[in-house]
């Protein structure tokens, strides 16, 4: 069913009785060409691009709960490609370009809104680092723009320019950055993949791998065994648990990241704004809530709930740069499990087990990567070689020393 | 018109009259009123507009879960959007305005949207607004944003202050209704330390809203007596106007106390206090929330929850209508009819969805058993309702009861899941409660009053006994006991009209059915697709009915269909309260250097360096800009002598007989042979082999060393040293203490530094090059007996010393040094001149030690000893960190000396296109060198050490610059180092 | 969270800084033949269990002890707190 204004008009006039399920609810077949474990954004995107671009349609997505229940369903919705390092920048730029054409591509309005992202800086040293980054972005045609404090004062008069502990010296804009209606991304990819014949199977938890002589031949699930030529894990914060079933230890820790939304407000913020002297990033949703977040709680956890110190730290960051939000009320907080990698960058790679693939380590930046992650993972699954934009996202890079560390924090996941 | 709907009774203080305005209209109320009760008393039915369809809405509830009656409270910078009129305490001079409409509330221009409702069903926006592509950001989204949202922020800084505090208790009782009061009394009598918190300004909860008697007196009277007894106990802290908003790990609760929200102004006091409560045990006695029934046009002003209707009558002395009808699926709804009838309010009808006989006889009321309301009429206020049998009943208020949901919210904050209870048709607390939590009363599904009172007491007694206190034997208070009787009934299927489930977000029964038809059947999908339960009330009255309707669609039971768990906060918390006083200049602590006062008196401009404020430069009269000052400071330091406060560098005192061995583990270079009285430069790696920090180590005694770190890493290095000491090499005899704040330290640099210092050292301490050469250190006294440490080290490249004195002498020392330096024209210099001189000298600093560079990259490979292990050594040897084409730190100078260099520029080889594929590296630090007379830079470029003399492009599109630069040695100034040794 | 410090009693976790798996105590011997591999495992690979986890916390706003805390990563329940130095010595670390 193709969505359009006309279709809405027709349905509206006939009592909205003709709407059909956005995806089917099939029972698993005995065997697939590819099984994707994890019906989050990345898993569904992988299925979509596998079926659409690479023509692999005998695919199942196995989701232990409901699709989109992972981090695609609980994030701060930001998209951007303001990366600097060669291992990252082309990949995230690819992702941003895919976002730009996504809705027309999968005929679903995910409300991709290129409202801009602004990273504030507060010291000369930080400015120098941002200029380096801005140039890397411009030399990659990703677009960047430096703004001085005077310009920001004109554009965003509500920021604290006169009484700040760490005065705002300027900012780095990526005007193409912005936000997306996060749940709709999962649904749009699911719908697209389903229409191409992919089986999306909810409430299907993988409980083991079938590995014989170093070759993965399928998975064990709570709905029985399912065979596959290729099995692709794509489970973010659950990566260590799932891959442990295949006997693997990963360069990943699971941490909780809390995110927050205020009550609905009339238009307040134009785009995404991030604080450079504390942990706070914020945008306003189309519904009017200020969606914001900060740092991870910082300890290993699989509990999808965080604690108060981080909540307070984030609010302090918000009040430090925009004290006009003092009377906005925090409405809801939630916690997502982050697959924090050892250098802050992800993996899209084969494993030492033939036929078993791994996608993970997205830290808390996985949402913006969703389309490119799916595309590149699909490429790897279909062609057995990495997509040109994801060649460095290898699991063995810490052996060779080919680290991709944008923040320069080293092998301590909770610092990325 | 004034208080036309005020009736007798209630707990408001009629001796005082409070004036307030709503949408500019003057009205009156009394102390004890909420804004909602006062609006109802004044006959104001229409109070707001719904989120999506801009439907007229009135007051729906009498609690913090109100979905409709949201107002902008107060004005100017105090404006507070989305404030629930049902909990806003009335004060004299209160100003409230309705929100989410264009034009007057009565004639909202946006209400036309309602006519388009057939085309705006669940998720319509996912299916359209995609063409043409560019229209989303430019047309559709701005329109959606303008029509969405609720209230407005003032966009001015929040003028109020907020405090934070910590409380500890044996037992936290959450909610001061019947169960909570009964529990607090029992626990309080045991002597345990109790906190009793309630979100209301008046303790008593449902006791204040009902006409039940407790221990032979009015419920509200019993509550007041209980509160008086509790107030007299030293071990009990009573916290009204306090919401326990979150249950966190290990018995920690978040609480928000509203201190001045009920007053016309805060009077300089904190508006609210955010408490962290550390409890050994907690008892959730948060009561229950009534839920509505969905039927056609059930959203009109005048359609209210039945419990709220009698709350307004009983507690506030207000009749929500002149002629009231009741629609219920349970006996409790009948109480609304009887209570109101007792107060002389006309009851038009009681419609009970259950068959059978009427539960009460009410004079003049139409009793309809097995009745269904299919529609209502009255655009801006209810006028009549239509039953499924076609009967039309005139009424201006309809009290609806669909049963009660225990307030299990806090039981879910640690991911606990509630259990379904068939008798109540509601979720009750599950088995996996937060640590230390028990639940009693209505929150636990014990809805009858007498049972709740007993439950509270019994649970409290169990808890205090567990905690080792002696439980009081006093019996539980007695009350009439009527078990809850009801039959599930969620929505009127016969209704052809839209039937609202989520009032605020305008989610109707049809939307839920469509959500099901489209496959959004998981509860979470339902919520996300339809926005049900996502409004400011978080679905407190809508989630369960929605779940029931979804269950009907899927043919499953409600618990099979699922439940949504609740997350903090219970009710929304202002950002200002969460931030507390950490805002503005107090966002983070400010650290001042010991010579801060001197610097301030001598014209310093300060700069934030981490939490420190450091002198950036010292402007002198006649200087036109910062460059003039910095150039002068550099020139005069290099020509004679300059002084800089370098206290901010981390200082770590290291003692013990294994200190040298310890340092050998920490630093890449060897430390075993450093003699007493000598200083050595040291480079630290992270364990992953990346360069981490550099500094110096001075050996002051046989087993005594002083380490310096960079300012940025002072705390982090100390942490790592403790890790190495306690976890990696616990057998070493070594002890550490941070002395960063203990010693004030000054760099005295320049050819006259020795002459200057010789004037202040005691007893003719020999500063000659022979006695105290480059990299010497000593403990001595200065200025006739002041203890000091002296280091012959140089960051500037000049002959230089660093002198340290106890921090309390720091400010005086700066004055002494400047006075002694007068004859040499000594200058104070700030961080800018410091930076210029270190770049001239080619020293790496924060921009180079950025956590991404190796010793090899930095040109410090020679500092990594091949003869011993150290932290980071093994992993630093990985092949990709030692590639032949690795970047190297080198110097850059512009081919045209007139051109300025810019940090952050990328290097591109001549003839190559400027893109990242051709990227050769980046410029990390630049300065104008007054000595060289042109701009100079440090930067990283591939194989830089082998490319000296080559010209490359330094491109900086972000700043609109491109400069040809020559690769040179990073040591621009005195490359042989003769000066610093001289 | 509250960490029951073996020397100081219960303290709010906000006083501490978290590092990670207590396996970080077990720094490999750099002189063995497969030191590179061992350091890779030590530096980069983690069990990351869902359940009981021994982990390192540093009492930065306190007495500067490093602690080994045994905590459940699903429930956050803390079952044991030890001085990391004691653990390190017990695991055979010396000088």
Image: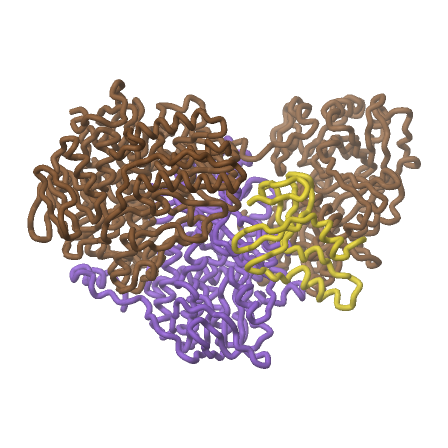
User: Which residue is more in the foreground, B963 or B155?
Assistant: B155
Residue appearing at x 59%, y 53% in the figure:
C71
Q: Which chain is brown?
A: B
Residue A59 at x, y percent in the picture? 42, 75
Query: Color of chain C here?
Result: yellow
Q: Is residue B574 visible?
A: yes
Q: In the visual, does A164 lie left or right of B129? A: right
Q: Which chain is purple?
A: A
Q: Quadrant of residue B820?
A: top right
- C75 above or below B233? below
Q: Quadrant of residue A327?
A: top left
Q: In the visual, does C57 lie left or right of A15? A: right
Residue B109 at x, y percent in the picture? 20, 41
Q: In the visual, does B675 lie left or right of A82? A: right
Furthest residue in direction top, as rendered: B15
Residue B888 at x, y percent in the picture? 71, 56
Q: Quadrant of the N terminus of chain C?
A: top right
Residue B431 at x, y percent in the picture? 43, 53
Q: Is residue A149 visible?
A: no
User: Which residue is more in the foreground, B540 or B440?
Assistant: B440
Residue appearing at x 59%, y 70% in the figure:
A247
Q: How is the image coloured?
A: by chain
């Amino acid at each position: 069913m193709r969505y359009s204004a006309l279709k809405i008009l027709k349905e509206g006039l006939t009592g909205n009785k003709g709407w059909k399920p956005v995806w089917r609810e099939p029972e698993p077949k005995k065997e697939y060409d590819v099984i994707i474990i994890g019906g989050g954004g990345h898993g569904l995107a992988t299925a979509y691009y596998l079926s659409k671009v690479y023509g692999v349609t005998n695919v199942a997505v196995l989701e232990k709960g409901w699709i989109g229940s992972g981090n695609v369903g609980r994030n701060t919705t930001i998209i951007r490609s303001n990366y600097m390092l060669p291992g990252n920048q082309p990949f995230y730029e690819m992702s941003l370009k895919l976002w730009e054409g996504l809705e027309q591509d999968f005929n679903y309005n995910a409300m991709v809104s290129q409202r801009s992202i602004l990273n504030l800086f507060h010291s000369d040293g930080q400015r120098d680092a941002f200029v380096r980054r801005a140039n890397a972005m411009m030399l990659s045609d990703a677009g960047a723009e430096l703004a001085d404090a005077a310009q920001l004062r004109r554009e965003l008069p509500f920021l604290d320019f006169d009484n700040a502990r760490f005065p705002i010296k300027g900012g780095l804009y990526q005007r193409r950055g912005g936000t997306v209606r996060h749940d709709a991304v999962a649904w749009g990819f699911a719908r697209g993949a389903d229409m191409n014949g992919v089986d999306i199977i909810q409430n299907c938890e993988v409980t083991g791998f079938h590995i014989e002589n170093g070759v993965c031949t399928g998975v064990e699930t709570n709905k029985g065994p399912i065979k596959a030529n290729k099995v692709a894990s794509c489970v973010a914060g659950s990566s260590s648990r799932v891959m442990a079933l295949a006997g693997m230890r990963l360069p990943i820790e699971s941490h909780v990241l809390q995110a927050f939304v205020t009550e609905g407000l009339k238009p307040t913020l134009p785009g995404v704004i991030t604080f450079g002297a504390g942990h706070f990033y914020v945008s306003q949703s189309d519904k009017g809530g200020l969606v914001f977040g900060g740092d991870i709680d910082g300890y290993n956890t699989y509990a999808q709930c965080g604690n108060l110190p981080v909540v307070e730290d984030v609010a302090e960051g918000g009040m430090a740069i925009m004290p006009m939000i003092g009377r906005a009320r925090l409405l809801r907080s939630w916690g997502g499990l982050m697959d924090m990698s050892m250098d802050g960058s992800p993996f899209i790679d084969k494993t030492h087990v033939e036929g078993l693939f791994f996608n993970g380590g997205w830290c808390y930046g996985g949402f913006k990567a969703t389309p490119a992650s799916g595309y590149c993972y699909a490429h790897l699954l279909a062609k057995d070689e990495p997509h040109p934009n994801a060649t460095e996202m290898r699991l063995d890079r810490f052996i060779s020393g080919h680290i991709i560390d944008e923040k320069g924090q080293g092998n301590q996941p909770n610092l990325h | 018109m004034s208080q036309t709907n005020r009736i007798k009774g209630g707990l408001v203080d009629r001796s005082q009259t409070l004036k307030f305005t709503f949408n500019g209209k003057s009205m009156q109320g009394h102390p004890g009123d909420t804004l909602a009760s006062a609006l109802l008393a004044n006959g104001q039915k229409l109070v707001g507009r719904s989120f999506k369809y801009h439907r007229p809405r009135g007051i729906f509830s009498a609690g913090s879960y109100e979905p409709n009656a949201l107002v902008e409270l107060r004005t100017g910078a105090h404006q507070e959007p989305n404030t629930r009129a049902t909990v806003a305490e009335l004060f004299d001079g209160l100003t409230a305005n309705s929100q989410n409409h264009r034009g007057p509330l009565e004639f909202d221009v946006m209400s036309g949207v309602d006519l388009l409702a057939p085309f705006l069903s669940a998720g319509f926006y996912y299916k359209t607004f995609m063409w043409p592509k560019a229209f989303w950001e430019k047309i559709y989204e701005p329109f959606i944003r303008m029509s969405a949202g609720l209230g407005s922020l003032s966009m001015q800084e929040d003028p109020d202050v907020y405090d934070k505090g910590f409380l500890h208790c044996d037992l936290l009782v959450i909610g001061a209704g019947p169960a909570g009061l009964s529990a607090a009394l029992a626990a309080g009598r045991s002597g345990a330390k109790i906190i009793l918190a309630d979100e209301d300004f008046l303790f008593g909860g449902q006791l204040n809203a009902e006409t039940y008697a407790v221990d032979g007196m009015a419920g509200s009277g019993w509550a007041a007596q209980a509160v008086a007894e509790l107030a007299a106990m030293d071990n009990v802290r009573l916290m009204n106007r306090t919401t326990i908003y979150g249950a966190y790990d290990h018995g920690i609760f978040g609480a928000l106390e509203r201190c001045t929200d009920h007053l016309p102004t805060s009077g300089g006091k904190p508006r609210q206090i955010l408490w962290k409560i550390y409890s050994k045990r907690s008892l959730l006695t948060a009561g229950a929330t009534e839920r509505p029934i969905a039927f056609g046009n059930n959203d009109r002003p005048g359609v209210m929850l039945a419990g709220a209707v009698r709350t307004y009558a009983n507690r506030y002395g207000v009749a929500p209508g002149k002629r009231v009808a009741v629609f219920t699926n349970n006996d409790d709804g009948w109480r609304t009819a009887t209570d109101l009838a007792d107060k002389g309010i006309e009851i038009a009808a009681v419609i009970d969805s259950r068959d059978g006989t009427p539960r009460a006889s009410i004079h003049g009321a139409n009793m309809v058993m097995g009745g269904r309301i299919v529609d209502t009429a009255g655009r801006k206020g209810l006028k009549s309702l239509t039953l499924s049998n076609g009967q039309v009943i005139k009424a201006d208020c309809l009290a609806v009861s669909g049963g009660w949901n225990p307030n299990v919210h806090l039981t879910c904050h640690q991911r606990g899941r509630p259990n379904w209870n068939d008798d109540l048709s509601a979720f009750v607390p599950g088995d996996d409660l937060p640590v230390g939590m028990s639940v009693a009363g209505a929150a636990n599904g014990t809805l009858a009053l007498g049972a709740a009172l007993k439950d509270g007491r019994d649970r409290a007694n169990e808890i205090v006994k567990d905690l080792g206190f002696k439980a009081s034997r006093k019996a539980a208070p007695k009350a009439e006991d009527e078990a809850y009787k009801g039959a599930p009934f969620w929505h009127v299927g016969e209704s052809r009209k839209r039937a609202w489930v989520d009032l605020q977000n305008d989610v109707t029964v049809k939307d839920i059915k469509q959500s099901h038809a489209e496959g959004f059947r998981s509860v979470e999908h339902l919520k996300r697709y339809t926005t049900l339960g996502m409004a400011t009330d978080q679905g407190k009255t809508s989630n369960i009915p929605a779940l029931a309707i979804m269950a009907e669609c899927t043919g499953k039971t409600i618990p099979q269909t699922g439940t949504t768990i609740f997350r903090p906060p219970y009710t929304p918390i202002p950002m200002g309260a969460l931030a507390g006083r950490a805002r503005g200049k107090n966002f983070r602590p400010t650290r001042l250097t010991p010579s801060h006062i001197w610097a301030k008196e001598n014209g310093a401009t300060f700069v934030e360096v981490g939490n420190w404020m450091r002198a950036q430069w010292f402007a002198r009269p006649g200087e036109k800009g910062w460059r003039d000052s910095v150039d002068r400071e550099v020139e005069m330091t290099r020509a004679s002598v300059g002084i800089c406060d370098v206290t901010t560098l981390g200082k770590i005192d290291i003692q013990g007989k294994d200190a040298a061995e310890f340092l050998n583990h920490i630093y890449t270079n060897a430390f075993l042979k450093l003699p007493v009285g000598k200083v050595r430069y040291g480079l630290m790696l992270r364990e992953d082999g990346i360069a981490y920090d550099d500094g110096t180590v001075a050996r002051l005694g046989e087993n005594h060393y002083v380490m310096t770190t960079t300012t940025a890493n002072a705390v982090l290095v100390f942490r790592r040293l403790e890790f190495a000491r306690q976890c990696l090499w616990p057998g070493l005899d070594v002890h550490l203490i941070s002395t960063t704040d203990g010693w004030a330290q000054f760099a005295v640099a320049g050819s006259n530094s020795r002459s200057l210092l010789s004037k202040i050292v005691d007893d003719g301490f020999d500063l000659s090059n022979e006695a105290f050469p480059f990299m010497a250190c000593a403990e001595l006294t200065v200025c006739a007996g002041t203890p000091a440490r002296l280091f012959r080290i140089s960051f500037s490249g000049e002959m230089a010393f660093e002198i340290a004195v106890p921090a309390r002498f720091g400010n005086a020392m700066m004055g002494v040094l400047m006075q002694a330096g007068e004859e040499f024209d000594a200058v104070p210099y700030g961080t800018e001149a410091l930076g210029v001189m270190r770049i001239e000298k080619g020293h790496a600093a924060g921009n180079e030690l950025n956590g991404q560079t190796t010793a090899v990259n930095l040109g410090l490979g020679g500092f990594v000893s091949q003869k011993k292990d150290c932290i980071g050594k093994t992993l630093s040897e990985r092949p990709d960190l030692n590639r032949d084409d690795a970047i190297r730190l080198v110097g850059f100078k512009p081919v045209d000396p007139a051109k300025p260099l810019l940090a952050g520029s990328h290097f591109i080889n001549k003839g190559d296109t400027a893109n990242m594929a051709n990227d050769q590296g980046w410029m990390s630090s630049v300065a104008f060198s007054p000595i060289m007379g042109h701009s100079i830079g440090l930067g990283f470029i591939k194989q830089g050490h082998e490319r000296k003399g080559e010209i490359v492009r330094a491109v900086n599109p972000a700043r609109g610059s491109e400069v040809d630069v020559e690769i040179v040695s990073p040591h621009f100034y005195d490359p042989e180092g003769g000066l610093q040794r001289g | 969270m509250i960490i029951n410090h073996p020397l100081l009693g219960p303290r709010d976790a906000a006083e501490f800084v978290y590092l990670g798996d207590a396996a970080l105590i077990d720094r490999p011997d750099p002189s063995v033949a497969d030191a590179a591999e061992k350091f890779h495992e030590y530096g980069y690979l983690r069990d990351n269990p869902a359940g009981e986890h021994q982990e390192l916390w540093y009492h930065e706003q306190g007495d500067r002890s490093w602690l080994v805390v045994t905590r459940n990563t699903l429930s956050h329940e803390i079952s044991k707190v030890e001085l990391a130095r004691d653990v390190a010595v017990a695991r055979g670390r010396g000088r």
